[in-house]
Amino acid sequence: MKIIKESNKFANKLLYIFVFIGIIPLVAVWVIYLDNASSPFLNSIADRFSSLPAVTSVKKPLMTKVMDVYCKSAPFLAIMLFLCSIKLRKFKATTNRGALIRSCLLSPFFYPFFIYFFLFRNIELTTAGRPLRLMSGQDLPLLLVYISLYAIVFFLTYGMCYIPVVAYKIFKERR
């Protein structure tokens, strides 16, 4: 039991490090935008990826386009973390079998809809619900929206990678 706890503690630290590293570029884009709202660097990124659908704000189109482009990289970082931590993470066989089966069956249906909705559709924040509409014109709240979007996509992808592994290990141990 103690070995499982220590191994998972290290895997969790690795998870937090990856998330922190993943969020740093969003903060860098925010700082660059605050320094120069018409930055040639940000403009070149936005122009290069202008054909991609994005979650943007009409009030801050450059910053939101670049941040959205970066948020699309969250699944790749989560998969890299999964590959780095797959041998570190240990599981207990006391998991509820019904909950495991539900998660294995329902999660693959929820994940693609979420990813499609936030990464492969055009969404305008100024026409969204009231909280997002209020946040869409200010720099710091927009940064928080994109950090949240990045983290949610990251954790969902990481969790989706682990579902088959956990199911296999738990069913294998129960035999």
Image (cartoon, helix red, strand yellow):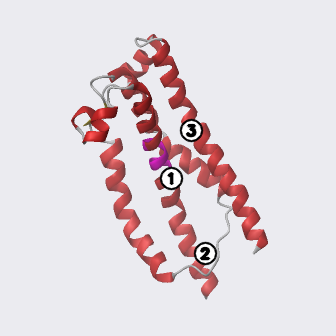
Residue 103 in which image quadrant: bottom left
Q: Which residue is mark 3?
A: 22
Question: Residue at the spot x=51%, y=59% of the render?
Answer: 159
The span shown in magenta is: 149-155
Q: Which residue is mark 1?
A: 155
Q: Which residue is mark 2?
A: 169
What is the crowding at mark 1: few (fewer than 14 residues within 10 Å), some, or many (at least 20)? some
- Distance from the alpha carbon under mark 3 to that under mark 2: 29 Å
Asked if marks 2 and 1 touch (Cβ < 8 Å), the reply is no
- Asked if one can make out residue 122 in the rendered structure from this viewpoint, the answer is yes
- Asked if one can make out residue 55 in the rendered structure from this viewpoint, the answer is no
Name the residue type under label 3: Gly
Q: Tag on residue 90?
A: none
Q: Position of residue 59 (x, y in %)?
A: 29, 23
Q: Position of residue 160 (x, y in %)?
A: 48, 60
Asked if marks 1 and 3 touch (Cβ < 8 Å), the reply is no
Name the residue type under label 2: Lys
Q: Earlier in the sequence, mark 2 or mark 1?
A: 1
What is the crowding at mark 3: few (fewer than 14 residues within 10 Å), some, or many (at least 20)? many
Q: Position of residue 9 (x, y in %)?
A: 71, 59
Name the residue type under label 1: Phe
Q: Does dot 3 land on a helix, a strand or a loop?
A: helix
Residue 80 among those drawn in magenta:
no
Which of labels 2 and 1 is toward the front? 1
Left or right, residue 108 beside residue 32: left
Instruction: Judge by depth and name the residue closer to the eye, 170 or 126.
Output: 126
Question: Residue at the spot x=27%, y=25% of the render?
Answer: 58
Q: Quadrant of the N terminus?
A: bottom right
Question: Residue at the spot x=46%, y=55% of the render?
Answer: 156
Q: Quadrant of the C terminus?
A: bottom right
The rendered magenta stretch, by its main secondary structure, is classed as helix
